[in-house]
Amino acid sequence: MDTYKRIYVLGSGFSKSISKNMPAMSGLSQELRLAKDSKYPELMDFMRNLDRKTNGSKELTSMEAVCSLILGRDIYYNSSVYLYYQILQNQLVHWLYEKIDTAADHVDADKVEGLKNFIMQCACPANGEKSLVITFNYDLLIERLFASMKDLPCRLDYIIRLNSYFGEAEIDTGKEIFPYLKLHGSFNWFRSPGSIVCNTDNVYLTEEGGYSRSLIHHNDIPVFVPMTFSKQSYLEGSFFNVLWNIAQRYLEMAEEIVFIGYGFPVTDLINLAFFLNYKDKIKHIVIKGEEVIRKSRLEALFGKERIVDQDAVDYLSHIS
């Protein structure tokens, strides 16, 4: 098992830094409140009723609140309610996937070089001490950068072994590895058709433009954990247990942890408790423009000296 002295943990602020089109949570909330999309009739009707019942409360119709109301529900009065919420859950997760993946489909041109340098620093450092990247993001910004830059002397590796339907991806074993552990799933990971939960033997990696994406999973929802207070139903099965177990082992062996664009949101209290086990190893928590209340909470938890108010890519440009 490889060991990494330094581990970078990426949150949504990192993706926003490298893609100006990456929607913010507030933007998604506003868009869902005002959405009129015939593709998702039950979801749109649910939002209209919720807006009416709450007198337009932004707090109760926020993305996190809606996700928790729909995705976290586990009590149903009868089979009709159960079936209704199954439809709502499918439509909401599909809507989220579509909005995020369509809006942020590439790295901004002026951020490419900085991101490339970061990747090289992790995979091919001059001192030979490679770094591990762990992320809560499920977008494909880094994957698409790799696909567009064939000259990179390294290849992306998810660490966990994923299945392939047709052996679409040819792995260049002569390249160095950029280790990329995605704890909340990825927009190019799919359960095998008909599977209800994620297990280590039924999650498949699909290639954009590949046969499996267009023929088998053309209308499926990827494997990812939405921003909801209750995540239990999305973490059922062995798959995410294995991902988090791998992360725990690497964190135990690391000497330094840097959080970039991750402000420990209230929907991730379990994550906060988990990472507090490694509090002494945390060097920096890099955030940009966080609201005062969240920044104050982070400073109280980790100390002011560890909180860096800086753009993610600007911060990365100074690492060594």
Image (cartoon, helix red, strand yellow):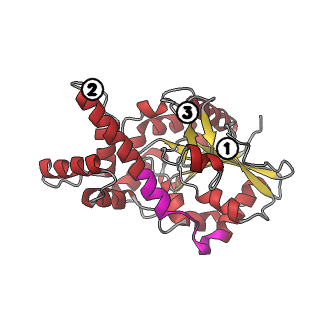
Amino acid type of the residue that numbered disc 3 sits on in the rendered structure: Phe
Residue 208 shows up from this direction = yes
x, y (%) of residue 133? 65, 49
User: Horizontally, is 198 left or right of 53 in the view?
Assistant: right
Q: Quadrant of the C terminus?
A: bottom right
Residue 240, labelled with which disc? 3
Q: Earlier in the sequence, mark 1 or mark 2?
A: 2
Q: Write down the quadrant of residue 147 in the picture.
A: bottom right
Q: Earlier in the sequence, mark 3 or mark 1?
A: 1
- Identify the residue under disc 2: 75
Give me the residue at 56% from left, 41% from top: 190
| Vertical arrangement, residue 188 with respect to residue 111, above or below | above
Give me the residue at 75% from left, 53% from top: 155
Give me the residue at 60% from left, 31% from top: 202
- Identify the residue under disc 1: 158
x, y (%) of residue 33? 26, 57
Amino acid type of the residue that numbered disc 1 sits on in the rendered structure: Tyr
Q: Dot 1 surroundings within 10 Å: few (below 14), some, or many (20 or more)?
A: some
Q: Is 171 in the magenta? A: no
User: Horizontally, is 124 left or right of 138 in the view?
Assistant: right
Find the residue positioned furthest to the front. Answer: 215
x, y (%) of residue 206? 63, 47
Span highlighted in magenta in the image: 96-112
x, y (%) of residue 213? 59, 49
Q: Secondary structure at mark 2?
A: loop
Q: Dot 2 surroundings within 10 Å: few (below 14), some, or many (20 or more)?
A: few
